[in-house]
Amino acid sequence: MTASVRPVPALLGLPVVTGATAGACVVALAGLRAAGHGGFATEPAGALALAVAAVAAAVAASRLARSGHRAAGRLATGLAASLLAYLGLAVLAVATVAAGHRWAGPAVAAWNSAWIPPLALLQLTASAAVRSGTVTPKAHRYVGLVLGAATLVNALLTTATEPFDGLPTIVGESWRTALAPVGAAVTVLGVAALLLLPVTLWRAALGSHHTVRARLGVAAAAATAAPLTVVFCLLLAIARAPGDVEPSLGSVAFLVALSGAAVFAVACAVTAARGATEPRRVGTVVRTTGLAAAALLVVGAGTLVAAPGPSLGPTSVALVVSALTVVVGGGAWAGTGRLAALLTAAPEVPAVAPVTPVTPRGGAEGTAAGDAPPHAGTPDAAVSDVVETTGPGGAAAETAPDASGAAVRAPAPTGAGVRVPVPAGAVPASVGGLTAREREVLAALAEGASNAGIAAQLVVSERTVDAHLRAIFVKLGLTPGGDTNRRVRAARIWLEHARQRR
């Protein structure tokens, strides 16, 4: 009997509460703007973008909780709260500055640092959506601690000289920084922290196959939105000098970019948690990420080309920027298309040559000439019927009966299973002696996850995954060597077990 997953009651009304709070903040900022206070901090476009992102994060938190991904739901709730805090601090900072209150300085400093937590939380939400278990990964702790420290250091060490006269992150002369080396070191650590989860998730995705690869790829694309937002912030600095772009325009653009990254990340988190791995959806996610990176590259390069220094005429600048757009945009479109196809492609069986027949346990040698495999056409045959052997150099090779009953063998990529039929009696069918964690590892293996993919989903190290797999092989009686690969036989055992339970 399968137990139903109950949603967290507190999250069911979260979108309504978030929408009401965000709306109140937007109205307050609009009132301050009408009174002539705040400059870009009260710009309607930026305020509305943050409000929409907060509501989107709240909706995602509710959906993730209903689907049983409670850790991801809590992190999405934290993302919604951090975006609301950013809006609320803007109201507080503008109001205290307008009133000349003595707390104006700390309020502005807190507001100036409030953009960092959403970057961390959007990454953690996407990463948690493809994980299982209750243990917090070390990578999550590192990201949280480092970016939390960066928020605190930025709030304590920076002081505004002219609050709201441009965006502080791209108008350095409007701010004074105490202990600059400390701030620089924390900034470097923060950037490294933002790169950790994207690298980890992309590595796990590309090392896995089947639906696991697509789900991890979607989560990796979502986590990539955070460092892209930081790159956009740096490009705003280039756009101001030497690009001579109005600081207030760059300020609003940054708020919109941060909000867009949050919406994109929570949408990807919900998609990955639900296991939606349709090629069109995965392609949309991957292409959005790749084209955003390409756009940033074109904008940065175009700004440098259009700067007063190179002294290029308008026609030359237009030609250079057009050429960059075609080359970079075209390359990003083609590259992301191939990546999306890789993430959603099923393994193919290459042409093979006959070798020694395979003898199933307790059965006859091979299949009769012209006979179909005993369970070909069953619902899980396309997923579970895989036999691998160890080929030259440690690479995996596939073994399966051909039309005449003889086994065939061909090299296959390391770590990837190839869907070929084997006799049902070729493997045992008991998993009763496995622990709960070993069952989780075996289930992830049967889905097509590599060791890195299993580690990413179960929040353990790859060394721990390897140890669990060795124990699983022993308990299932899968000895090394012989004609078949233990990983594939173990996956077949689990899928047979799952089919018997249905």
Image: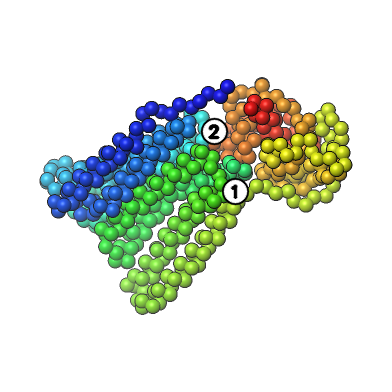
Residue at (30, 58) in percent of width and height: 250
x, y percentage for residue 183?
32, 47
Q: Is residue 51 left or right of residue 352?
A: left
Q: Name which residue type carries label 1.
A: Thr
The residue lying furthest to the left in this view is: 100
The secondary element bearing badge 2 is classed as helix
Report the front residue among 32 and 456.
32
The secondary element bearing badge 1 is classed as helix
Report the front residue among 426 and 381.
381
Q: Is residue 234 left or right of residue 43?
A: right
Residue at (60, 45) in percent of width and height: 207
x, y percentage for residue 96?
16, 44
Task: Check the image and report above or below for 361 versus 433.
Answer: below
Residue at (29, 55) in percent of width and height: 251
Count of numbered circles on the image:
2
Residue where numbered disc 1 is placed: 344
Which mark identifies residue 9? none
x, y percentage for residue 110?
25, 43
Residue where numbered disc 2 is placed: 458
